[in-house]
Amino acid sequence: MTFEAISQTGTDKMEKAINQMKKDFSSIRTGRANPMILDKVLVEYYGAPTPLRQMSQVSVQDGTTLVITPYDKTILKEIEKALVKADLGITPNSDGIVVRLQFPPLTTDKRKEICKDVKKLCEDTKVAIRNIRRDMTDELKKIEKSENLSEDTVKDNQDKIQKLTDKYIKIAEDLAQEKEKEVLTV
């Protein structure tokens, strides 16, 4: 394996860590209705757990309400059960045709709690990025032994790995800061 291959693999893995963090952030409540919060909700449909967004249309109404319109009206009760089971912190309201999720305004304490979750997700992502850096460095050491690379080459490559790590950690921190700002905005 060459340094270029190590670098490319490491970059791909770091990119995946950032994408996972973005995905996790999208399911965090910010006081505004966001259909992505329903991505992890599974509804029991003919004995198979099915993602809610595959079996219904989800729309945002007046910024604080999600309206879920099932394609099959007979599964309305199952959707309600799945929403309660998903523990979103919101009680579903059904009128027999659609299910509404009314997002209450977040309290200051709740906003601070959510910010802690955001920081923890960011920290987890940074740990994952550092683990990728460690793996890249280990691979570099294997190449160093097998190909008798000069110390300067190894040092240059280690610097490149560190710069890549710093870049992705900065991206993670910037995303977390953005999300915190979004959560704290009333």
Image (cartoon, rainbow, N blue to C red):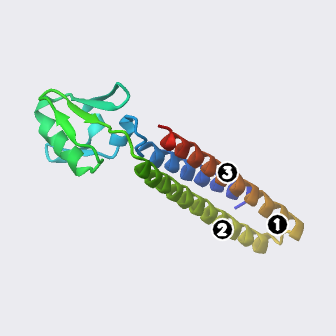
Query: What is the crowding at mark 2: few (fewer than 14 residues within 10 Å), some, or many (at least 20)?
Result: some
Q: Quadrant of the N terminus?
A: bottom right
Q: CA distance from mark 1 to mark 3?
A: 24 Å
Mark 2 / mark 3, whichever is N-terminal: 2
Residue occupied by mark 1: 154
Residue at the top extreme of this rendering = 62
Q: Position of residue 98 (x, y in %)?
A: 19, 28
Q: Are marks 1 and 2 in contact (CB under 8 Å)?
A: no
Residue 80 visible (yes or no): yes
| Amino acid type at mark 3 | Lys
User: Viewer-proximal residue, 48 or 61?
Assistant: 61
Q: Residue at x 19, y 40 (%)?
A: 79
Q: Nearer the viewer, residue 137 or 35?
A: 35
The x, y position of residue 118, in whole percent, is 50, 52
Q: In the rendering, which numbered label is found on residue 134?
A: 2
Q: Which residue is mark 3?
A: 170
Q: Give the x, y percent position of residue 82.
A: 21, 46
Q: Residue at x 21, y 47 (%)?
A: 84
Looking at the image, residue 27 lies above or below residue 160: above
At mark 3, the secondary structure is helix
Residue 126, placed above or below residue 91: below
Identify the residue at image location x=89%, y=66%: 152
Tell me which label, 1 or 3, sits earlier in the chain.
1
- Mark toward the start of the polypeptide (1 vs 2): 2
Amino acid type at image mark 1: Val
Residue that protrudes farthest toward the front in the picture: 108
For residue 144, what is the image quadrant?
bottom right
Q: State how far apart marks 1 and 2 are (Cα).
A: 14 Å
| Residue 49 visible (yes or no) | no
Q: Nearer the viewer, mark 2 or mark 3?
A: 3
